[in-house]
Amino acid sequence: MNLKRFLILNLTGIIFLFGLISGAFAQESGEQYVRNEWNFIDQSMDVSRGIPEDAGGVLGRIRDRRTLRVATEPYFPPQEFIDSTKVGSKRFVGSDMELAQLIADRMGVTLEIVPMDFSEVLASLDENTCDLAISALSFVPSRASSYELSKGYYFSGDNAGNGILVRTEDQDKFTAIEDFSDKTIAAQRGSLQESLMAENFPVYKEFIRFSSAQEVYEALENGKIDAAMVDIETAQSYIDKETGTALMLLPEFQFQLEEQFKGDRIAAKKGQLQLIYFVNAVLDEVLESGQYMEWYKEAEDLARSLGL
């Protein structure tokens, strides 16, 4: 009989304590913008008139350029994916893409979606090639210390959390953390799951990082790895869709996040708090109206019709 082990993730000890409650940051406009105690931004600003005239930094450049450039990895339905029946920028669809369009609309500028590998999404902010990263980003303390993160806007359902995915035939091999010591494990590069694996699995034969979740699933199916740390909701959706797959989530290994770590986030370059205050105002709008979840459900139906 498997030994049940329900693991609760506690990331509090590795929070980078910079820019906490007392930390106020002056922008070019002279206004004060602050992060909360968890080092992300949960406050917003008045965006009824679009981008403020005195906006500085990236937000000011967006206004002057008249274009919002958004980085995303378009292979994560239903948040962001490619509709093969469309061409040009219209082929990038999903609930996150609808959100990106609304942010651009509230700014009064044109939206430009810039597709790339997930591992490059955040780097594009540092390189100033993109203004925002909207790609189902989770809160990770190290990520919050390097970028400005918005409040959470999408929260998974009852099966929220992260877990271990294995081949069904191997399920009895894993009853304790020690069982992974001679196994090859994997996660998506730059993801929350990569951090969870590194934090909770001290011994393993090899740790491989893949560019996308799809690559993780395929490597496991093809026997290139023995187990993977995955988002439960997304992995279960893949299992349900791929009727021929022989993968399963191990119920003994589930990693639930504390409340402050839940929710997908939007990221901006470090120091651009004014930009995230603007973003949060749009998030307030879609969360209060329920619009984001409407987009999400519509995107689920579209992805299903496309076989994704």
Image (cartoon, helix red, strand yellow):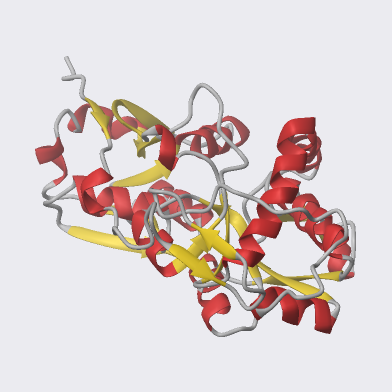
Q: Nearer the viewer, residue 45 or 4?
A: 45
Residue 85's x, y, as percent?
Answer: 89, 56
Residue 194's x, y, as percent?
Answer: 34, 55
Q: Nearer the viewer, residue 247 or 51?
A: 51
Q: Residue furthest top?
A: 1
* Residue at (70% x, 46% y) in the render: 283
Counting every numbered tag in the picture gives 0
* Residue at (57% x, 53% y) in the render: 150
Q: Quadrant of residue 50?
A: bottom right
Residue 66's x, y, as percent?
Answer: 86, 78
* Residue at (57% x, 71% y) in the render: 272
- Residue 29 located left or right of residue 174: right
Q: Residue furthest front?
A: 30
Q: Is residue 138 above or below residue 295?
A: below
Q: Quadrant of residue 241?
A: top right
Q: Nearer the viewer, residue 242 or 124?
A: 124
Q: Is residue 177 above or below residue 196?
A: above
Q: Looking at the image, can residue 104 be seen?
A: yes
* Quarter of the image with the C terminus in it: top right
Q: Looking at the image, can residue 211 be seen?
A: no
Q: Quadrant of residue 289?
A: top right
* Residue at (42% x, 39% y) in the render: 260
* Quarter of the image with the N terminus in it: top left
